[in-house]
């Protein structure tokens, strides 16, 4: 029998090698698919467990928000409750999809029971919240105990935990199968060593590509670092890095960190974990003298970033600005007084009888001159208050008499808006307080002006003087009540801010500078009183000013009648 030629042997070896490669490839594909299926099953199981845990967390947030609102009555406890309700539907849908993928037994009956329990719990929560809002804490607490919310939540947890336990058993089974497949793949992979030579070229190409990519990423990182250094040099603030082991270094240069600043930063970090969120504080530097605004921010891995800004210069600018405003306001008063005097003389006919059109123009100019005068007075008062230069002259006076005088003084303004002013009985028998009568008249003018301008025509603004105790001190409270549209909820926190008005249209309709209530609050505080308000949109507003009663002896206080 003739011996096969080398070409035949080579061809046969090539053919057998190809068959071997094909067989190994087919087997590797089978093993890979098995591993992929096992991993997919494990992944789905993990997602299902996560979904069950997320739903339990959401239901816990819902229960916590509901109970917090019922116990405290604070609306901010409803935020987690509403967020939990918003997430619940999506999480329920996701859970249903995952259970369907896992082909769990009795999935429909399980989901139906879960939906019924969730619906029952939501209904109980809504009823508890409604009872708290309408009937108060006691009724809501009784309802909370008797409604069965805890029992329903326990049933939900039991159902979800049962599903989680079932899924974890499935995960253990799938993980075991994946481990067995991996072991078989390891043994079969030994045969793949024959393919190393064929894969060497591809490996070389891949390595070369990876090295090239790494070099490019390194160059980009260097460029980013250079840009960051340029930004740090351009930033006017000083930046400090506080490491997890509480080491403080200055960023942007190699400058040293002041020992006192390092100690202050570490003190404000408090615990070894540092601050949880942003933390701001003011630090005074001794040499050279400076005031620094410092902001601490957590970054990552227990590190913090501190930003220090010198505010000394800013305060000097603010002082110069305040002096400029005061100077300009004073300089405006002299020509404005002359203008108003001349307009008043023209309006009275001292320069001869004016035509109707001219008289109308003079009236408009006179009215706007008065508005400008009030604006200047308000600005000067605010600057004096902020600078602590406003002098108070307290007198022992009858509060009821002051209020009655305020009604008389502001009656013409109220009549121009077709609004009445009424002092409600009963009046306190002993109503002496120590105030500056002129400044108290300014307080009442501001409050009455706001109430009148925001009252519908034909309505009345009610004033009341009643005894009241604040902080253990005996005093009297003056209330100014209107029946207008009230103060919008979004604006109520800014009522006493400077230049604050509800909106631009409000300022155009009623006039004013937006300084009145800010000045009023400072004047009341200087008279050792308190001011506040209660407003319901659509129903009206009640501003109340509390002042301490005069207690004998009165040797240092001059008594007078307003």
Image (spheres, rainbow, N blue to C red):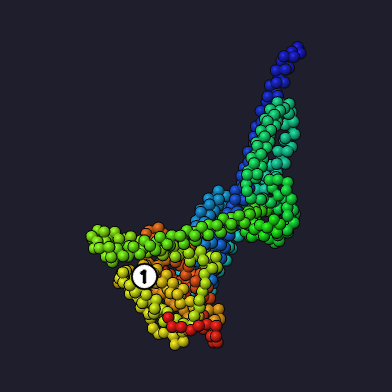
Residue depicted at x 46% and y 60%: 331
Left or right placement of residue 122 versus residue 44 in this view: left
The C terminus: image quadrant: bottom left
Helix, strand or loop at disc 1? helix
Which residue in the protein does label 1 denote?
452
Provide residue 410's location: percent of width, then percent of height.
36, 73
Could you tell me which quadrant the N terminus lies in? top right
Can you say whether 417 is above or below 268 in the image?
below
Residue at horizontal 68%, vertical 27%? 205
Q: Which corner quadrant of the image does residue 465 belong to?
A: bottom left
Q: Residue furthest front?
A: 351
Residue 112 as seen in the image, left or right of residue 286 = left
In depth, the one of 473 and 77 nearer the eye is 473
Q: Which picture quadrant has residue 264?
A: bottom right
Q: Residue 502's spot in the image, x, y percent?
A: 42, 61
- Residue placed at 46% from the left, 87% from the top? 430
Q: Nearer the viewer, residue 12 or 70?
A: 70
Q: Nearer the viewer, residue 179 or 373?
A: 373
Left or right: residue 207 compared with residue 160:
right
Q: Measured from the top left, where is residue 403 in percent x and y?
A: 41, 78
| Number of callouts | 1
Q: Is residue 532 visible?
A: yes
Residue 301 visible to the viewer = no
Categorize mark 1 by other alpha carbons within 10 Å: few (<14), some (14-19), many (20+): many
Name the residue: 39% across, 83% down.
425
Question: How far from the left and from the top, in percent, is residue 538?
Answer: 38, 67
């Amino acid at each position: 029998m003739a011996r096969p030629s080398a070409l035949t042997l080579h061809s046969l070896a090539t053919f057998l090698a190809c068959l071997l490669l094909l067989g190994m490839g087919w087997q590797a594909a089978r093993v890979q698919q098995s591993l992929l299926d096992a991993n997919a099953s494990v992944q789905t199981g993990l997602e299902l467990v996560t979904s069950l845990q997320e739903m339990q967390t959401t239901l816990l947030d819902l229960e916590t928000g509901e109970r917090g609102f019922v116990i405290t009555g604070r609306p901010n406890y409803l935020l987690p409750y509403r967020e939990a309700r918003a997430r619940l539907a999506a999480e329920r849908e996701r859970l249903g999809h995952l259970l369907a993928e896992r082909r769990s037994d009795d999935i429909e009956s399980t989901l139906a029971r879960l939906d019924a329990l969730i619906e029952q719990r939501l209904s109980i929560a809504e009823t508890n919240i409604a009872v708290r809002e309408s009937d108060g804490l006691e009724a809501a607490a009784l309802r909370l105990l008797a409604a069965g919310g805890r029992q329903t939540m326990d049933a939900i947890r039991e159902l979800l935990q049962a599903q989680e336990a079932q899924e974890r058993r499935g995960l253990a089974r799938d993980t075991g199968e994946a481990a067995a497949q991996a072991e078989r793949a390891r043994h079969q992979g030994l045969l793949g060593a024959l393919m190393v030579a064929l894969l060497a070229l591809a490996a070389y190409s891949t390595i070369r590509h990876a090295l090239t990519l790494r070099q490019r990423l390194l160059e980009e990182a260097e460029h980013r670092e250079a840009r960051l250094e340029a930004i740090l040099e351009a930033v006017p603030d000083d930046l400090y890095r506080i490491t997890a082991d509480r080491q403080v270094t200055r960023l942007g240069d190699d400058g040293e960190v002041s020992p006192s600043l390092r100690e202050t930063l570490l003190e404000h970090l408090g615990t070894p974990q540092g601050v949880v969120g942003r933390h701001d504080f003011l630090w005074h530097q001794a040499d050279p003298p400076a005031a620094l605004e410092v902001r601490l921010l957590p970054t990552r891995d227990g590190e913090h970033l501190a930003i220090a800004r010198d505010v000394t210069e800013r305060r000097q600018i603010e002082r110069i600005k305040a002096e400029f405003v005061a100077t300009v306001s004073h300089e405006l008063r002299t020509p404005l007084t002359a203008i108003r005097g001349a307009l008043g003389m023209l309006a009275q006919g001292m320069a001869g009888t004016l035509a109707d059109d001219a008289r109308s123009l003079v009236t408009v100019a006179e009215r706007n001159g008065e508005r400008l005068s009030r604006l200047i007075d308000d600005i000067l008062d605010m600057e004096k208050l902020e600078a602590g230069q406003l002098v108070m002259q307290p007198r022992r006076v009858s509060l009821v008499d002051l209020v009655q005088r305020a009604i008389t003084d502001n009656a013409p303004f109220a009549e121009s808006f077709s609004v009445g002013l009424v002092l409600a009985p009963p009046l306190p028998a002993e109503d002496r307080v120590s105030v500056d009568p002129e400044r108290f008249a300014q307080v009442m003018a501001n409050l009455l002006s706001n109430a009148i301008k925001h009252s519908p025509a034909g309505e009345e603004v009610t004033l009341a003087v009643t005894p009241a105790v604040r902080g253990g001190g005996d005093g009297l409270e003056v209330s100014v009540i209107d029946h207008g549209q009230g103060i919008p909820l979004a604006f109520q926190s800014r009522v006493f801010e400077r230049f604050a008005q509800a909106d631009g249209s409000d300022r155009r309709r009623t006039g004013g500078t937006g300084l009145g209530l800010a000045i009023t609050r400072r004047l009341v505080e200087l008279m050792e009183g308190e001011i506040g308000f209660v407003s319901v949109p659509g129903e009206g507003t009640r501003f109340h000013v509390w002042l301490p009663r005069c207690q004998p002896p009165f040797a240092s206080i001059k008594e007078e009648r307003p």
